[in-house]
C-alpha cells in the first residue's frame, strides 16, 4: 500500500504602507526563528518582491493540520495579525493541503519525455 504524504502549505501575502515598511520587515524577521522551531513546522520563509519592496510573501509548511491550528492559536500568529494597521489592505491568506508533493523528479520526468506532464511517468511514493 502506497503511503500518502500530506503537507499543509500556508501562503500569506501583504502590502505594507510605504512609511511602515521597516516595521513590517522587523516584525516578519522576528517571527522566522521562533516559528521555525514550533512543533510540526517544516519551513517558514519570508520573501520580498524585487519590484515592490513593500510587497511581502510568507510561505509556511506544516506536517499536520493540528500543528498549523496550534500555530494559528499562538501569540506569534497574533503578532502577524497585529500588523494589520501597517498594511495597505488586509492580509491575503491561503491554506493548501497537498497529498502528492513532488520535487525535481517530476521536472526531470517531464523534460525527459519532451511533452506535457503525465502522472504515470512520475512515481510519487
Image (cartoon, helix red, strand yellow):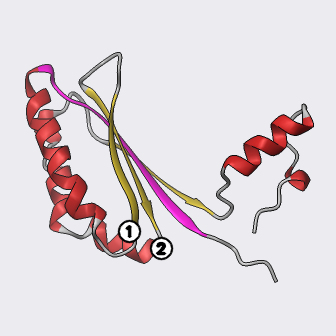
Q: Vertical placement of 1 versus 59: above or below? A: below
Q: Is residue 15 magenta?
A: yes
Magenta portion: prevailing SS class: strand
* Image quadrant where residue 7 sits: bottom right
* Image quadrant where residue 42 sits: bottom left
Q: Vertical placement of 78 versus 45: above or below? A: below
Q: Quadrant of the C terminus?
A: bottom right
Q: Quadrant of the N terminus?
A: bottom right
Q: Please report the bounds of the magenta region as a residue range.
A: 6-18
> Looking at this view, is 88 or 46 the one in front?
46
Label number found at residue 64: 2
Gap between marks 1 and 2, in whole Å?
A: 7 Å
Q: Vertical placement of 34 versus 117: above or below? A: below
Label number found at residue 68: 1
* Image quadrant where residue 21 sits: top left
- Secondary structure of the residue carrying numbered label 1: helix
Q: Image point 8% across, 36% down: which residue?
A: 23
Query: Residue 123 placed where, x, y %?
Result: 82, 61
Q: Image point 19% across, 54% down: which residue?
A: 31
72 lies left or right of 108: left
> Looking at this view, is 70 or 31 the one in front?
31
Q: Residue furthest top?
A: 51
- Secondary structure of the residue carrying numbered label 2: loop
113 lies left or right of 49: right
Please report contact status of discs 1 and 2: CB closer than 8 Å, yes or no. yes
Amino acid at each position: 500500500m502506497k503511503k500518502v504524504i500530506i503537507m499543509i502549505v500556508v501562503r500569506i501575502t501583504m502590502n505594507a504602507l510605504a512609511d511602515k515598511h521597516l516595521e513590517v520587515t522587523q516584525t516578519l524577521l522576528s517571527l522566522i526563528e521562533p516559528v521555525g522551531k514550533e512543533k510540526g513546522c517544516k519551513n517558514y520563509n519570508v520573501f520580498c518582491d524585487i519590484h515592490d519592496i513593500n510587497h511581502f510573501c510568507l510561505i509556511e509548511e506544516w506536517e499536520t493540520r493540528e500543528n498549523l491550528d496550534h500555530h494559528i492559536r499562538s501569540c506569534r500568529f497574533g503578532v502577524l495579525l497585529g500588523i494589520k494597521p501597517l498594511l495597505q489592505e488586509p492580509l491575503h491568506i491561503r491554506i493548501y493541503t497537498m497529498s502528492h508533493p513532488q520535487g525535481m523528479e517530476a521536472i526531470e520526468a517531464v523534460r525527459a519525455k519532451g511533452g506535457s506532464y503525465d502522472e504515470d511517468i512520475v512515481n510519487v511514493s
